[in-house]
Amino acid sequence: MKINILRSSFQTDEFVWNEYADLIERLKNECRAEITINDDQMADAVMIATGGVENLFKTLFNGHGPVTLIADGRNNSLAAALEILTWLEGQGVEGRILHGKNEEIVMGLMGRMGLMGGLGKARIGLFGEPSDWLIASGVDHGYLLEHFGVETIDIDLQRLIDGVRAVPKEEAAKVAQIIVKRAQAVKEPSCADMLEAAKAYLAIKKICQEEHLDAMTIRCFDIVKACGTTSCLALALLNDEGIVAGCEGDMQTLMSMLLVKRLCNAEAFMANPSQLTETTTMLAHCTIPLNMCDNLTLRSHFESGIGVAIQGALPLTDYTIFKWGGVNLDRYFVTEAQAVGTPYSNHFCRTQITLNVDLRPYMLQHSIGNHHVIIKGRHAEVIGEAMKKLRVKSEK
């Protein structure tokens, strides 16, 4: 994403860099923005830094909309942006001003442009084929490339298996020690289990770096069989580090997670709907970004009893439930709810969250596959706006 900052001749570039340092830093880091000042070409967004730049904008405007203007109000920036917006309207061009605190501007920019600009250029690594039981969770890879510019890279699982075996024991031990110290408790996993899970993490991360991946998903159970460990810990840590990581080769859910990361700048908990009542919905899985949890217990993987899984305690706060699916990503579901306290059950995957929402009509009649993603906070509006732009059908 390119952002061109406009300033009047009464100010200098140095003034702009200093005056808007915090906002510029956030735009660079969170929106992946390339920043220029008084460039002679249009950009994806134009930030108005001072008043007196209306004619400057006219000289660089290329006649194409919609136009996104940024103005936080300082230095007569909002006044200038309003004049420009009115001029654009007179030209029959759609425009919008992002105004407010830095957080509001960044979130607004990501909400408006993050889907098309953010998903584009993404590289997804597919570590093996989707799990055999996922018969309705694939995405046409050609469609992803054609419509979103999302490139999919096939990673041979043998490459990963060889990589796990090649990780030095000392390097893995350092990672294992850090995670054990971070946990409130360790139940089933032994020191050897922690070591092997750390090796899987380091091997997956190495391939992600070598292939310049923005996201990845893995055929988990083949790693259990070949390496005697799980990828649950690896996926948790990768999500914490900004690499969107999902289970079981589920591409629809991975795309949902990638959208959430780019659009809302949030990590997502990929989970199985597990219990539905008239007042609550419980979802569970064996991995979750550690940053989402108040505390964590290291457990074995629920189905296999092998390796290291995450039992995370999530805060009782607001959440968004979301799924973007269909072979051509033509359906979505989103709603908001609050987490409610409930006892932990040994009959489900390790991390569990119960939300005060009745999803039975949707889940039992026309659910978009199995996995759904859980996001801290209320994001339904910004997700819904993005889906409308893509003309994706909403499921209620």
Image: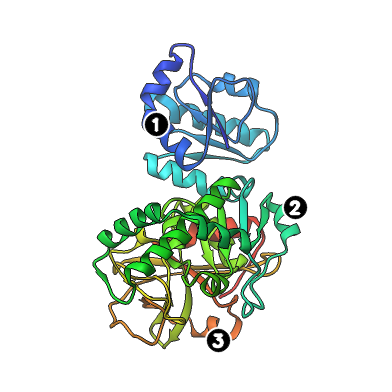
Question: In what element is the residue under mark 1?
Answer: loop
Q: CA distance from mark 1 to mark 3?
A: 49 Å
Q: Nearer the viewer, mark 1 or mark 3?
A: 3
Q: Is residue 361 left or right of residue 169?
A: right
Q: Position of residue 180 (x, y in %)?
A: 29, 62
Please tell me whether residue 238 is drawn above or below residue 27 in the rendered image: below
Question: In what element is the residue under mark 3?
Answer: helix
Answer with mark 2 or mark 1, whichever residue precedes in sequence. 1
Front-most of residues 226 and 35: 226
Q: What number is the disc on residue 364?
A: 3
- Residue at 25% x, 59% y: name it: 181
Q: Position of residue 2 (x, y in %)?
A: 58, 33
Front-most of residues 313 and 357: 313
Q: Badge 3: how crowded within 10 Å, few (<14), some, or many (20+)?
A: few
Q: Badge 2: how crowded within 10 Å, few (<14), some, or many (20+)?
A: few
Q: CA distance from mark 2 to mark 3?
A: 33 Å
- Residue at 38% x, 84% y: name it: 279
Question: In what element is the residue under mark 2?
Answer: helix
Q: In the rendered image, which residue does mark 2 sit on?
A: 146
**Residue 313 seen anywhere in this rendered image of the structure:** no
Q: Amino acid at mark 3?
A: Leu
Please tell me whether residue 230 is drawn above or below residue 123 in the rendered image: below
Position of the N terminus by quadrant:
top right
- Residue at 48% x, 16% y: name it: 8
**Residue 240 seen anywhere in this rendered image of the structure:** yes
